[in-house]
Amino acid sequence: QKEVEQDPGPLSVPEGAIVSLNCTYSNSAFQYFMWYRQYSRKGPELLMYTYSSGNKEDGRFTAQVDKSSKYISLFIRDSQPSDSATYLCAMRPFSGGYNKLIFGAGTRLAVHP
Amino acid sequence: GAVVSQHPSRVICKSGTSVKIECRSLDFQATTMFWYRQFPKKSLMLMATSNEGSKATYEQGVEKDKFLINHASLTLSTLTVTSAHPEDSSFYICSAPPTLQETQYFGPGTRLLVL
C-alpha cells in the first residue's frame, strides 16, 4: 500500500462546476499538507498549505484536512478552463528539519468550456 | 511566494556527454534542496536531497556516481548527469524549502533529451 493514494483521473468537468480532488494517506504522523498545481511541461506551483486538521480558503480554492479519517481534499469553485492541470497532493510529518515531501500520483483535471 | 529558478530549461546532448543543471533560490536561502525526476504523465520521483556544505543523500536505486549533486551555497545546487544515455532523458525538477518554512517551492524544470 502506498503512503499516499490519489486517483490519477482524468477528471473532466464543464466550466463553472465545483471540483473535488482527494487524497488518502496511511501515516498518522503526517502533519503538513499541501496541494500543488502542475501545468504540462512546467514545475509544480504551490496552491494551498495547511497544518493539521481544518479548512483553509483562498479565493476559489478550499483545502480540507480530516486527520481522523486520514483524508484531504481540495475544492475548486467556479472552475475555469485555465484550471486544467495536474493537481498533486503532498504531505510530511512534523520532524524538526526533516522536510522530504510524500506526493500523491496527481489527478489530471480537464475543464471544458 | 518564493522563487526558484532552473537553468537550462531545455538541453539536448549526445550520448556519453555530461550535462549540468543549476537550481537557484532567488529570494531566500535554502540549506536543503531536492532533485526530482518526472516521466510523462507520472508523478514526481525524488532522486536526492542536496545539503549545503555536506554530501547529498540519494534515494534508493539512484546512482550517486551517475547523478552528481553539489550544493555550493545557500542559494545554488547543481545536478550533473554524467555520461548521459538516452534512458536519462526526462524532466528534472528541483525544489527548495525556505529556512524555517514547511513548504517547498519548485523550479520550472529542465527537459533533458539525450540522443
Image (tube, coloured by chain):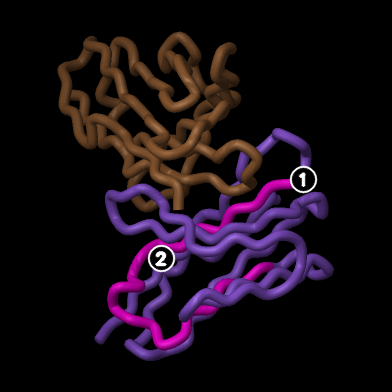
Relative to B8, A12 lies left or right: right
Q: Residue at x 48, y 56 (%)?
A: A46
* Residue located beneath label 2 in the image: A108
Quadrant hosting residue B90: top left
In magenta segment, residue A73: yes
* Number of on-image labels: 2
Reading the image, the residue beneath label 1 is A94
Magenta residue check for B72: no
- Respond whether the residues carrying marks 1 and 2 are from the same subunit: yes
What residue is at 65 percent from the left and 40 percent from the top? Answer: B100
Q: Classify 10 Å Cα crowding around label 2: few (below 14), some (14-19), many (20 and above).
A: many
Left or right, B79 with respect to A26, comes to left
Element assignment for label 1: loop
- Give the image location of residue B68, x and y in percent: 43, 14
Over which residues does the magenta segment extend? Answer: A72-93
- Asked if disc 1 and disc 2 are in contact, CB closer than 8 Å, the reply is no
Q: Kindly report the distance in space between the C-alpha atoms of the residues bearing marks 1 and 2.
A: 29 Å
**Which residue is at a point 20% across and 15% down the rendered structure image?**
B15
Can residue B91 be spotted in the picture? no
The amino acid on which the numbered mark 2 sits, given as a three-letter code, is Arg
Q: Locate residue A109, reporting x and y percent.
A: 39, 71
Q: Which chain is brown?
A: B
Numbered badge on residue B73: none
Q: Position of residue A2 (x, y in %)?
A: 66, 50
From the image, which quarter does the C terminus of chain B lie in? top left
